[in-house]
Image: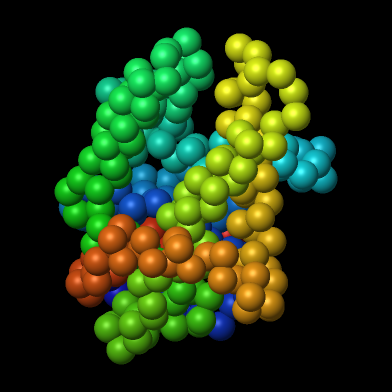
Amino acid sequence: MSGGTVTAFLARADEASLPTLGGMARPDGIVIASERFWAFARADGTITEGKMPAASTAFRSIPIVRGLARLSASLTPLYRGGGVAGRHEKLFLTVAMLAPCVFVFFSETATLIAGIVLSLALLGWLLRGRTLYLHGAEHRAIAAAEQGTLAATWRGDARPSRFSLRCGTNFVALVLPVGLLGERIWPFAPAIWTPIVVALLTLGVSMELWRAVQGTTWSSIKGLLLPGLALQRLTTREPRLEETQIALTAVASVLRRELA
């Protein structure tokens, strides 16, 4: 869609009932996704579109399992999208996700060193290029959809917050303490598969907690997200208008199909 077409569509979308949106910042663009569709808008003006996998109704009713299913689905644009992530990048992500399963065979010292190296590599991958600014733009565009200010945000008349309760940074900030607690209270004798099971349970429990905190009105419970919101001061930067418009272009692509 051209700039004028996007603006006109966003003005109409402001009057509609919109689905919940999520996103992912990339060094050269922004992915926006609903439960059914995703779009990747690049800084060069091109856009790639796709469909999210249909969620199993059985998974939706099983705590922890449904959280793991959501996490898997969130990676769809990276692994299924044409051009969203290259072959080498997909390989790197796959190795990074599977590496902790191999750490069980290392000594404690080797595990610590490998964990630090892996964390630094992932951090460098996540924050390269314009990712920090586009991450802030992603949050701003999603907040604009939730507040009904899409058109005004496109023009620069509105500037929703670049911080988000539903940011993956908040999720990561929950995973760390949940994982430490899980290791301490694990009731069974250690086995070769224990780290894998604990890791999966940690991710599933953290997802359940993360979603529950977002839906509560208790300010004391929402305080669990404060560490993640604080981290967003490091993982986001104040975006320029053109960067916000990249995110809004992806939002428009998703909503065009959702509202069709």
Scheme of colours in the image: rainbow
Residue 32, image quadrant: bottom left
Relative depth, front residue between 215 and 137? 215
Relative depth, front residue between 147 and 183? 183
**In this rendering, is residue 39 above or below 19?**
above
User: Residue 28's x, y, as percent?
Assistant: 22, 49
The residue that appears at 72% across and 41% down in the rendered structure is 64
The residue that appears at 46% across and 74% down in the rendered structure is 143
The residue that appears at 65% across and 25% down in the rendered structure is 197
**In this rendering, is residue 53 above or below 155?**
above
User: Residue 142's x, y, as percent?
Assistant: 45, 68
Q: Residue furthest bottom?
A: 157
Relative depth, front residue between 67 and 109? 109
**In this rendering, is residue 97 above or below 110?**
below
Residue 31 seen in this snapshot: yes
Relative depth, front residue between 165 and 23? 165
The residue that appears at 66% across and 55% down in the rendered structure is 209
Q: Is residue 12 left or right of residue 128?
A: right
Q: Is residue 81 left or right of residue 188?
A: left
Position of the C terminus by quadrant: bottom right
Position of the N terminus by quadrant: bottom left
Q: Is residue 192 left or right of residue 80?
A: right
User: Residue 160's x, y, as percent?
Assistant: 39, 80
Residue 95, image quadrant: top left
